[in-house]
Image (cartoon, grey):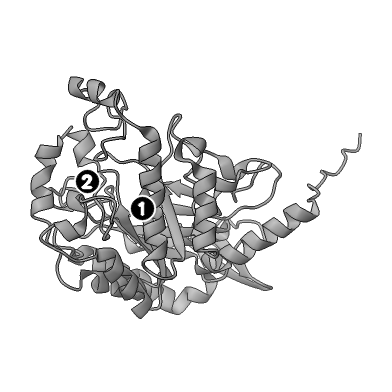
Amino acid sequence: MVKPKPRRAIRRPRERKSWAMKEERWRWFTDARFGMSVHYGLYSIPARGEWVRSVERLTVADYQPYFESFRPQRKCCGAWARAARRAGARYLVLTAKHHDGFCLFDSQRTAYQVMKTPARRDLVREFVEACRAEGLRVGLYYSLVDWHHPDYPAYRDRQHPLRHDPASKARDRHCDWSRYVAYLHGQVEELLTNYGKIDLLVFDFSYWDYAGRKWGASELVRKIRRLQPDIVLNDRLGREALKQARPPAYAGDYEQCEQDIPRAPVRNRKGDLIPWEAWFTLNNSWAHNPGDRDYKSPATVIRALVNCVSKGGNLTLNVAPDARGRLVARTTTLLAEVGDWLAVNGESVYGCGIADAPKPEWGRFTQHGRRLYAHVLEPVIG
């Protein structure tokens, strides 16, 4: 029996136009192939990871000393941007606000922000200017979760630091979710209005029923596209939304895989290839944690980068400055070695993707146009 050939999905004219617009928007991102992120905030002071408030169930009062002693070094953002450029990264992302709710930018919607600390400096502004000075695309990370906001529910959340606090149960009865969503949308508007062109916006994270409509995601994305039409968005306003046959407006532009590289190129349910990114830490911690000495080697990072590119994906590597915003020597040395490799072999990474040839036993192929690049990653005999 002859099996029929698989049918390709037929796109309607409107779908074709929408897909073409998306491709144009994300072209720089898929050409870049290698980027970096910076996790920095109040959690960098206790140096036990960015989830320290949740893991140790710290109250607002427990966490307050870090707010009162937040003093990043002058020009720390410039050092991050130079390290990223030295590594060969093409874009850099900063945690403008993490789950603890502390903002590294001058927000008019909260006093829980950097201008109210001893630093009294808008780190997002410094970061954006530093990236531009080094020729890097600018990315900002914004957590949808907020453990500090009074209208964000805490009791039995499983993530919130006060999830088992009986007082939280009573307080949650007075939470106004619509007020929190308005706060979230307002802060995103601040980030996309006050700092010029932003190339990449990374949301984190949707879970359980906190996804999509819960965030007012469609309305939010319409606002984002109005303010910054060319910005690239990740997929974390929803869950698996980008893979749907007809993804919602908030689906984003690429799939973000955390601490994982897919076995094969990523496709949606129609079978179309979609952009994706593997987001990795240098050790096992996103934020500064001197007790975590399990650093990846430069060779491991390079292999991961080649693996991603060969499957049509990006690698984004996270760094974790210390309490003063300094990168430890082990981090800068590793980044420099990756940069040395890319200085010689970058043409096999930047602008490259899936090869027409099958994967060889000894490594991987990447391809740009009709040019094939062979990455020999395993010893060969014969």
Q: Position of residue 215 (x, y in %)?
A: 45, 40
Q: Position of residue 139 (x, y in %)?
A: 40, 63
Check residue 204 in the rendering and tell me which mark sits there, or answer none: none
Say which residue appears at 16% left-offset and 72% top-offset: 74
Q: Position of residue 222 (x, y in %)?
A: 55, 52
Say which residue appears at 48% left-offset and 44% top-offset: 237
The answer to whether any part of residue 236 appears in the image is yes
Per the image, the residue denoted by label 1 is: 187
Left or right, residue 23 beside residue 123: right
Furthest residue to the right?
Answer: 1
Quadrant of image for the N terminus: top right
The answer to whether any part of residue 255 appears in the image is no
Q: CA distance from mark 1 to mark 2?
A: 24 Å
Residue 115, quarter of picture: bottom left
Per the image, the residue denoted by label 2 is: 49
Quadrant of image for the C terminus: bottom right
Q: Amino acid at mark 1?
A: Gln
Could you tell me if the residues under marks 1 and 2 are in contact, i.e. CB atoms within 8 Å? no
Residue 195, quarter of picture: bottom left
Q: Is residue 129 above or below residue 41?
A: below
